[in-house]
Image (spheres, rainbow, N blue to C red):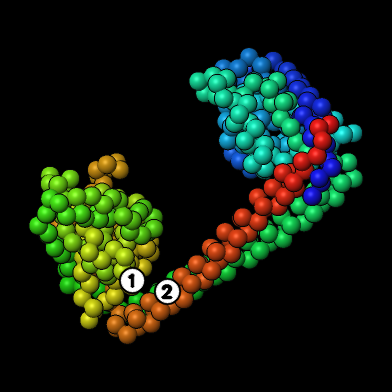
Amino acid sequence: MGASWPQVTLGEVAKLIQRKEPVVLGVRYRQIGIRLWGCGAYARKEIDGSETKYPVFYRILNNDIVVNKIWARSGTVAVVDDSFDGFHGSAEYPTYKIDQSLMIPQWFGWYTRSSSLWSQCEKLSRGTSSKSRLRPERFLEVTLPLPPLEEQRRIVAWLDGVKIRMDKRLAVIEEQERDADAMLQAAFQRLIEDAPYRSMAKVAPMVRRQIEIVPDEEYTEIGIKSFYRGVFHRRRQAGLEFSWQKLFRIEQGDLIFSNLMAWEQAIAVAEEQDHGCVGNHRMLTCQTNRRLATPNFLLFFFKTPDGFATITGASPGSIARNKTLSAKSLPTIEVPVPPIDKQHWFDGLQASVQKIHDLHAATATEIDALLPAMLHRVFNGASGQSG
């Protein structure tokens, strides 16, 4: 695409502009911010002139290019629309006015999402200061392909159309996932409505399978991710490296609580790949009585507001470091115990919903990869002569 397009510098199609305004006490200023990786502008906190250290602000108008020069190497460049007309930025946000007889703002707006621009910003930012600020005049050295105006409009319309379709598809996926999760939650509530409650000591008692550490044998130590994101393998190393602590064997199906981070939802069920790994004394491991409950049913309970409230109630302390899940309190927590066949049915329902999530995650990943590929085709395929 665009093999004959000329390459131009930004300085050929835009100029640095400073609409300087002295800061006045008692005047309210709407501040602009720029997101990373070409994700656009956003409104920062509106402030009074008395709340800033800057003596002047710079007014921003519709279709301006705005750069956060501190983080430019991470793609903090945006073309603003009319919703930001009249906003202000400090000297950290250099602004550029586009010559629209040569380039439409939307063309450069799409270019801000391109890795080609990000890599140039990174190179131009190197060595400028300890924080790698991009000097405003150097940003004008950025190069980009520049097709004729009509071609710019055609390609922008095509990219806009694709983006709209992608957003609609992602919105459908998100709605389907919300519906599936709501259905699962409703099914769980019906299941436990008349179910008896029994203590964790009866349903899933704590177990400590302490191992004898062999110095020259290797062990894989697990940890638990916060927000119910599962077990992860922290490290694999020789027993000699673990000689200062006790280790306990993990088995598939164990319900594991990180006593330090359970308050942040670090709770998980050990999977097949975790069988035979080890955990330290911070991992509170519970072995479910399979005649009474399933591990995944119990995990779902602890994901509910009522279930998680039992965890926070058993984790005393007012700050994160002190919110330790008590090994004495965990066995006293009461959990719902409906008939085991109904729990198995619910586990099957959970698995079906997880398949929906997995399918949608794969689809979302494909959609997310499509746009960068399109932008690469548009902007990196234009390798014509210098303008």
- Residue 258: which quarter of the image? bottom left
Q: Residue at x 59, y 26 (%)?
A: 125
Say which residue label 2 marks: 350
Circle 1: residue type: Asn
Looking at this rendering, what residue extends furthest in the left direction? 212
Q: Nearer the viewer, residue 152 or 48?
A: 152
Give yes or no for contact between labels 1 and 2 (Cβ–Cβ under 8 Å). yes
State left or right for residue 350 relative to residue 246. Answer: right
Circle 2: residue type: Gln
Say which residue label 1 marks: 296
- Residue 72: which quarter of the image? top right
Q: Nearer the viewer, residue 84 or 134?
A: 134
Q: Residue at x 57, y 69 (%)?
A: 176
**Is the residue 134 above or below the residue 85 in the image?**
above
State left or right for residue 249 relative to residue 373. Answer: left
Q: Where is residue 161 drawn, in percent x and y? A: 77, 56
State left or right for residue 156 relative to residue 71. Answer: right
